[in-house]
């Protein structure tokens, strides 16, 4: 005889029009844009809202996010899905590169390599995701990132190559 099913969990996601922020990206330098997002003058992108990913600081060549994964990002074995960490790292690496760009420039990931060092679950607490540019560029930029858990342990690292282009 099987146990009664667990109560259904629910998560509602609401976001603002992403094209409002995209329009601002054409007129603001990258660091100015990211700091406007931190200050709440530009809405965060929908992916950040979906993942509970918050940009908490940005300086030239660096972007730091925090997030607290919940059960909605679990894989079939009851741990945080690696894709969640990869997406968080991709966001931090991309925003680190964005912080080096002038108004009218954009970027996209060409490749990302992630090393998973430790499993995560809801007990892992707040994660800090830091992206740092290792080589800025006018056509291609390189960045590295690290995810740490609430106890400061490194749980994942990444390196990425990003294409820089005119928007």
Image (spheres, grey):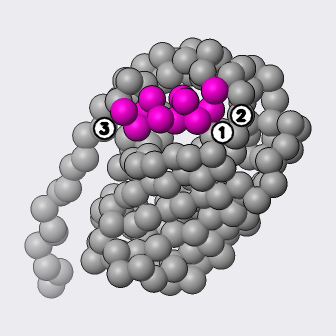
The correct choice, above or below, for 26 with respect to 101 in the image is: above
Asked if residue 161 is among those painted magenta in the image, a careful observer would answer: no
- Start-end of magenta stretch: 29-39
Apparent side of residue 160 relative to residue 70 in the rendered image (left or right): right
SS of the residue under disc 2: loop
Q: How many marks?
A: 3
Apparent side of residue 41 relative to residue 99 in the rendered image (left or right): left
Residue 148 position within the rendered picture, expressed as x and y whole percent measured from the top left? 46, 73
The correct choice, above or below, for 116 with respect to 93 in the image is: below
Crowd tier of the residue under label 2, counting other residues whose Cα lies within 10 Å: few below 14, some 14–19, many 20 or above: many
Q: Residue furthest front?
A: 60
Q: Earlier in the sequence, mark 1 or mark 3?
A: 3
Confirm whether residue 45 shows in the render.
yes
Crowd tier of the residue under label 3, counting other residues whose Cα lies within 10 Å: few below 14, some 14–19, many 20 or above: few
For the residues labelled 1 and 3, say whether their Cβ atoms are less than 8 Å apart: no
Q: Locate the C terminus by quadrant.
A: top right
The correct choice, above or below, for 47 with respect to 8 in the image is: above
Q: Which mark is residue 134?
A: none
Residue 15 position within the rendered picture, expressed as x and y whole percent measured from the top left? 35, 29
Residue identifier under label 2: 101
The correct choice, above or below, for 96 with respect to 41 in the image is: below
Dominant secondary structure (helix, strand or loop) of the stretch shown in magenta: helix
Q: CA distance from mark 3 to mark 2?
A: 30 Å
Q: CA distance from mark 2 to mark 1?
A: 5 Å
For the residues labelled 2 and 1, say whether their Cβ atoms are less than 8 Å apart: yes
Residue 48, located in which quarter of the rendered image? top left
Residue in view at x 65 percent, y 17 percent: 26
Residue in view at x 62 percent, y 15 percent: 27
Residue identifier under label 1: 98
Q: Which mark is residue 13?
A: 3
Residue in view at x 30 percent, y 32 percent: 14
């Amino acid at each position: 005889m099987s146990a009664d099913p667990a109560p259904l969990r629910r998560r509602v996601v609401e976001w603002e029009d992403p094209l409002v922020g995209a329009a601002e990206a054409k007129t603001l330098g990258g660091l100015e844009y990211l700091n406007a997002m931190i200050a709440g003058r530009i809405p965060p992108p929908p992916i950040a809202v979906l993942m509970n990913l918050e940009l908490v600081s940005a300086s030239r060549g660096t972007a730091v996010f925090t997030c607290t994964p919940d059960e909605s990002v679990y894989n079939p074995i009851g741990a945080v899905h690696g894709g969640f960490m990869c997406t968080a790292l991709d966001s931090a690496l991309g925003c680190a590169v964005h912080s080096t760009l002038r108004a009218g420039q954009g970027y996209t990931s060409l490749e990302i390599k992630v090393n998973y060092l430790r499993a995560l679950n809801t007990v892992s607490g707040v994660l800090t995701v830091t992206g740092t540019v290792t080589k800025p560029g006018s056509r291609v930029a390189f960045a590295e990132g690290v995810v740490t858990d609430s106890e400061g342990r490194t749980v994942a690292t990444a390196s990425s190559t990003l294409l820089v282009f005119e928007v």
